[in-house]
Structure formats: structure tokens, C-alpha cells
Image: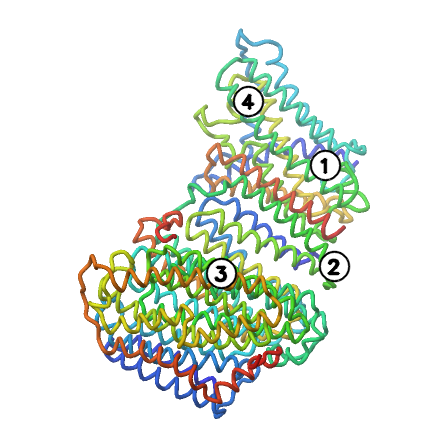
Amino acid sequence: METYITLALAIVTAPLFPGIILKVKAFFAGKQGPPLFIKYFTVMKLLRKGSVYSTSTSFVFKLGPTVSFTTALIVLLFFPFAGSMPLFSFHGDVIVLFYIMGIGRFFTVIAALDTASPFEGMGAAREVFFSTIAEVTIFTILILFYRLNGSLSFGEYFTGETHISPMNASGALLLFVIVALFMVLLTENSRVPVDDPATHLELTMIHEVMILDHSGPDLALIELGSFYKLFFYSAFITHIICPFTFASGAVNGLIFFAILTCIYIAIGLTESIMARFKMDLVPQFILTSFALVFFAAILTMGVLQ
Amino acid sequence: MIEFIFILPLATGLTALALPATLGRILLLLTALLHIQLTVMSWLGKLTPTFPSYFSASPEGLLILMVTSFIFVCISIYSFSYMKETEMENKPIFICCMLLFLGTMSMVTLSDHPIVLWIAIEATTLVSAPLIFIHRSKEALEATWKYVLICSVGIALALLGYFFVTLAMDLGNINAPMTFTSLNTVALELDPLWLKVGFIFVVIGFGTKMGLAPMHTWLPDAHSQAPSPASALLSGALLNCAFLGIYKTHVLMSVAGLGDFSGNILIGFGLVSMLVGAIFIIGQPDYKRMLAYSSIKNMGIIAFGVGIGGFALYGAFLHIIHHSLLKSSLFLSAGNILLGFGTKQVQRIGGIIRHLPKTFVSFFAGFIGISGLPPFGMFISEVIIIFGAFQKHRYICVALFLLALTLVGAGICRIFMSMSYGEATDRLQIEEKALRLLPSYALLFASVALCVWMPDIVYTIILDSIKIIGGTTHG
Amino acid sequence: MINVTESILVITLLSVLLSLGSTRLIALVKIMALQGIMVSLTPLFLRGDDSLGSGAIIFFQIMILIKGLLIPSLLYMAVKKIAIKREIEPIIGYHASILVGLVILIISVFITSHLRLSLPAGHDMVLITAITTMAAGFFLMMARSKAITQVIGYLMLENGIYLIGTALTKHSHTLYVVEFGVLLDLLVGVMIMGIILHNINSAFDDADTTLLRRLKD
């Protein structure tokens, strides 16, 4: 029961949190900012519209948004929100999930290429390049977690007997993971300083440029998909910061959403105080995140045997 | 209150900052005279340490203290005249740093706690840095930067070395205070592995400061760019202080039964330094750099002698004394030449014998001495070291030693000849002065005098310094 | 509860890694401040509360003040005064530097696990951190050409050595007076280096050590 409630909550509230980021950024800019529910309105508005397709595109272009939305949604089904049992779980599901997200990205990219627009091709190339490096970080994190608790599934990471928690021995290493994962989050979800979702110049875009040709419900699906993806990464970090092992499900849920909000605020803060990197500094940024996790992985091998 | 020996110059040094340059020069001279008086008192055993856990009057320390103090008196007389004749932007700073330099060097000689020793040696680097770039030329800045950075990093490694020695104490479960005196009594209980590691770091660290090759790169730059009185101090006194750090650790190693290990390391560094010094002296176009490389060579000889041990150790200690006296005398003479001709290039100088006849005498005598020829003390010390090496059957080392000496002799001779005779391309700018000649004469005279008649007290103090690790004063 | 010592050390390692990858000098100075504070805190948590006298507490306060505030602000002033913002052309690139950082870490883990020292529990990590910090400091000095970065490298080296001092030795030998002397040397050293830096900058119009090529044989 708890599982369904938390999952439903997650699916429903995911578009709320990007609103928080916008609020934080507006606060730093000294502005009122859009309402908290802005993202819901946007999605509603888009869903009401019709889609326009270029005559030069094929069915691949129409497939892109649907697949990317679905993959993002599937990932949520496997995640143990607020310490409740995930809907599905099997040994090794993390690997499958990260590749499912890969499929989503693949279809976004291929849809972008289908338009034959030079800008979109450029964006696709960048997106693929950066996420390839980010993948190294993610899989190093998985290796590290495997060493820490010997499992390969989100369910076991956070709900099992030997769940991952900063209170454990070698918990300090999770500090590395948190920082690295936050950097990956910024990269994968095209946030500042890697990418700027609010930019206006196609030349400097990474993710946004790929979806320029999508409109109406298609765009809504893409937007929703990206909200879920961001929600997933934030929830991942939340669980590493605090294992949800309190007795009552309601307490778990409250704390979960509290920390989650903090992470979104942190994203907003980062976006407010940092400028976008030059394109050639991005790989270095991601590489740093990899180095951090690698540090942690080495330390588990050397010190904690 | 033996600590007064280094507190006095530190205090007067800071006072000098507030005084005008004319008063400051008098203060410099006064402090130097007071300092040598205190040093003599400490030799006579009239001064006892107030903080025995940090400071003590070890024989080797006292010996180097006396050398430093004597040289400083001569140099302060020289500076008295030198400062009047050169343009210096900030004379009080110069005086202050000279005095602080003396103070920190005295502190090195008196410290008994390894880390206090380290602090003092690092402090010598810091207070001598302004001396080098007092003229603020681009070259001087570069030299200072290299000096401060290379020496600081090197000395930081020595600190690491001393931490390893502390670790050796922990592993040996020793609860004695951490001073060289008390460590020597419990040396056998120290963990040998970490003591060795510690020694290697200490040699690399203080060896950087002492100018052992291949860590010597800062030395020629700093010595050639510093004003001559400061060069004389750097070469004649500072290098000895760094050597003292290595020597005290070497004594600890020897007492712990690892004397062969540390000795061989010192011999290795010594030979490399001698050869490097010799190679760079040949064809050196700058006479102050040439003197600096000669210092590297001589530090190599000292390390070599200490490494060989036995009779050669006695030679090494004699070499320290004579090298300091001769080299500072030479740097002072070189200062006169630099003032006179305004250039450090050997090619542009000629006919010293005609233009600066009195300087020529001290310059000539200095060269005879530094080449290791009689009647100066370096002849005796080098012969003793060779003799000691023969006794220990180190024939290959002796061969390399002699090779280096020959190369140096040839290189020095060529430079000296072309400077003394030949034709000058530049005109003489500043005449020589009695105040700038007397100090070099005095230093040379001291070197000769010590050969002819060595006072008993000097003899005993050298014997006391070396007998703990098996040094002897007779073959 | 969370292991505080380990967290501090992990933050120190983090600062080492970030310093290898950071392009902006101001950011580097801030990282050094963080590292200084972390390094000065380590012995406090390593030894527990029982052995802390009032002298020790004052000493640690002074230490945090010097390492975390005074030295970084000196560096900050130097950076501001010589008006250089970033290292444009490092001798070894930033990507390579980060990878070197990883290699250094692997080596220090290797060294630590092969030393077979009878270290008290939890001190392994200190040793690893110390060796990494030292080596990274050395690397920074060699891989960057700006004079100020070299000073920062020197500071990192010192931090590493201090960590080794606290990690390896029982603290009964060294006295606070002595440690204070070491600290004072460090402070004055950075001050002197800052002055020389300033002079180099005004003489050469840039504080870049690649310009210092006048003296050679």
C-alpha cells in the first residue's frame, strides 16, 4: 500500500519541484518569479495544443517523446521512494534501469537527428558526448555500492538489511558520492553550469536544442519525462544522505520530501551563483565527478578491505 | 642564559628597523662585537641553557657558532663601508635582516630539539631572502624566488624526516624527551627502518639548504645575486648551519648503529656535489657564480669527509672552519671588485693587480687557499680527508675526489689569471677602502694562524664534536 | 553516528582533488582555506577529548585562525593585487592533473597498505590523505607556472606533512610551543613569498615563473 502511495505522490509531485528551482532563482534575482505550479500549467497548456510535424520527418520523430517519457516513468517504478518497497525489484535492476534511461536518450537523439536540422545534430552530439562521460561516473558509483553492500538493485540499496547509509563504517565516503552524483545530476538534467535550460541561443544549447521541433503533447511528454528524470536523481541523492528507516511511513515520507526540497533548492542555488561553463570545461567537470567516486572506490578497496 | 646569544641579535635587528641607517650601521657593529663576546663566554662554559629541553651548547654547535660569529664581525665591518658606497633602497631592512640572519643562525647552532632546529633553519631562509633581493633587479628577484621556494620545499621534507624519527621513537616505545642529547642515549632502541627513512629525508631537506648536488640549483643564483656581504654570510655561515642539521642526525644514526648507511649516503652526495661544482666552475663566465660553485664543491668535501668518518671526520671539521674563513674573505674581495668594476663578468675585468692592488693581495691569497694550496688551512684539511679515506680503503672515492680537486684548481686558475692580469674593458668606478680590505685580510690571517697554531680549546672542541661517532684527530 | 574524523579527511581529499582541477585562482585560495581548517581540525578528533588541555584548545584555535583565515587572506590579497584570475596555460593540463590525482591516490593507498605499520584504528585513512596531499602539492608546484599556484602547492605540501605528523606520532613528544614555531615559520614564509611575488609582478608585468629564465649556466 505504502508503495503505491509514495509512487503516486512521486508521479504527481514531480512537476512541482522544478517550480521550486525557479522560485529560488527568482529570489536571488530579486524577482517575484513564476507561481510554484508553473510546470503543471505548462504541461496542461501543451497537452491542449495540437502537434505540428515537419514533412521531412519520419515516424522516428514521433516515437522520440513517447519513448523518453516512458523510460523515465519506468525508472520510477523501481525506486524505493521514502524507504518503501519499490513496485518492482530484481537483482541487477540498477544496470537495466540506467540502460533504459539510455534508451530514452537514444530516442531523443535519434528524433533530433531525424529532423536533419544542423543545430539539433550538434546538440545531439554534445548530449551524447557528455552523458557518455557521466555514465562512467554512474557505473563507478554502482561498483562502489556493490562493494559497500553487495547488491545491485535500488530496493536492496536502500531497504535491505545492509542498506547504504552515512552512519555505517566508511559512511564518510558517501560524501564523495553525494558530491559526484550532484554533479552528474546537473549534467544529465541539463542544468547550469553544464547547460542552461533557459538559454535563447541555439549554438550554446545542449539538450534544449534537440527538442526545438517538438510541439504540443509531444513537448509535454518530453517535459514530463525530464521532470521525472530530475526527480529520480534527486531522490537517489536524498536516499544516500538519509536512509529512511523510521518506523512510520508518514514520517519517512515527510523527511523524504523535506530533503528532496533541499536538494532542489541546492540546484536553484547552484544555478543562481554559478555561471555556465565554457563548452570545453564541461568534460573536466564531469571528469571531476568521476575522479571523486573513483577516489571513494579506491578507498573502499585499500582501507576497508 | 645561553639563549641570549640569539635573542640579542634578534632584538637589535628589530630595533634597527626603527633607526636611521647611520645609527643602524653602528648598531650592526656593536651587536657583532657583543655577539662574539657572548660566544667566547659560552665557549668558556659561563653560559648555561635556561630551556634545556630546546637548547643546549653542543660542541659542534659551539664550533660553528664561533665561526659564524667571527665571520659576522668581519662582515659587519665591511658592511659599514659597503653600505655607504652602494645605493640601497632600504638600508634599515638590510641591517635588520643581517642581524636577524645572525640571530637565526645562532639559534640553529644552539638548538637541541630537532624541530626547533628545523624552525631555526627555515627562519634563516626567510630572513635572508630580503637580503638577496635588496637591489631589486630582475635577476635578484628570480634568485630570491628560487631560493625561497626551493629551500622551503626542501626544508619541509626535513620536517617530514624528523616526523619519521618521532615515529621511530614511538615504535621503540621510548618516552625520553625529544632532544638530540637524550635521543643519543636511547638511540639503539629506535626503530631502524624509520630512522633510515627519516635520515634520507633530512639529508635531502637540509642538503638542499646546504647546497648538495643535485638539490643545489638555487645556490649559484642566490650567491651571485646577493650583495657581497650577504653572499659572504650565506656561503661562510649559512651552509654550515644546514650542515649542522645533517651532522646531528648523522650522529644519531651512528649511535644507533646505522653509521655505515648514513655515511654512504653522505659520501654519495658529497662526491656528486664535488663533481658538479668542479664541472660548472670550468668555463664559468661570472666570478661570483664561480665562487658559489666552489662552495658547492666544498660542501661536498665536507659531506664526503663526514661520511668517511674516523680521521677524515677531523679533516671535515677543519674544512668547515677554513672554508668559511676563506670563502667569506673571497666574497668580500669579490665585492670590492664588483664595486670597482661594476660587473660580474670575468671577461670584462682585467688588471686587478694594477687597479686594485690591495684587493689583489687578498684575492690572490684567497684563491691560493681555496685551491687547496699551503699555507692555508684547506690544504691540511683536504690532505687529512684523503688520508682518512685511504685508511678506510675507499680508493675509488679518493680518485674521484682528486679528479674534482684538479678540475677545480684548473678552472679557478684560469679565471683568476684573466681577472688579475690582462686588460680591463671597463673603467674603475670606486676605489678600494681600508675598511673593506681589513676584514678579508683578517679572515685570511685567521686561516693561516689556525694552521700554524691551533689553540687547545679549539682542538678539544673539535675532538668533542667527533669522538661520539668514532672520529679521531690522529691517523 | 557519522564518523567525524573520516568525514574531515574525506573533505580534505576532496579539496585536494578540486585544487588539481580548479582553473580559477580565487577558487583555489578558497579551497586552500577549507583544507587548512580541515587539516587543523584533524588532530582534535583523532585524539578524542580526554587529552585536551586548555593550552591545546588555544593552540588549535590559533592554528585554525592562521591556516584557515590568515594565510588564505594573504593569498587572496596577493591574487587581487597581481590581478590574475586564472591559470591560462598550465604546464600540465587540467584533465591530466585530475587523472594524476587519481594515480597519486592509488599509490598512496598502495603505500599505506604495504607499510604494515601498527597504526591505531582509523589512522590508515589519515596516512592516505597525508601522502596524497603531499604528493598533490608537489605535483601542483611542478605542473603550474604561475608563482602563486606554486605557493599554494607548497602550502599543500606542508599540510600533508602536518597530517603525517599527527597521524604517525603520539603527541607526547612534540610540544605546542614547537608546533607553534613551525606554524609561525609557515606564516612568515607565505608573507615573504607574497612580497617577492608582488615584486616579480611589478618587475616582469606578470607573476609567471616561466619568465624567470635569466639565471642559468
Q: Quote the CA–CA distance across marks 1 and 3.
A: 86 Å
Residue in the image at 71% along x and 58% along y: C115
Residue in the image at 56% along x and 69% along y: C60
- Which of these two is toward me, B132 or B356? B356
10 Å crowding of disc 3: few (<14), some (14-19), many (20+): some
> Mark 2 highlights which residue?
C116
- The chain to which mark 1 is attached is A
Looking at the image, what colour scheme do you see? rainbow
Mark 4 residue element: helix
Q: Position of residue A156 (x, y in %)?
A: 78, 40
Pointer 2 with pointer 3, Cβ within 8 A: no
Viewer-side label of 1, 4: 4
Have a look at marks 1 and 4 and say if they share a chain. yes
Residue type, mark 1 in image: Thr
Viewer-side label of 4, 2: 2
- Which of these two is toward me, B91 or C122? B91
- The chain to which mark 2 is attached is C
Q: Quote the CA–CA distance across marks 1 and 4.
A: 34 Å
Q: Position of residue B56 (x, y in %)?
A: 53, 83
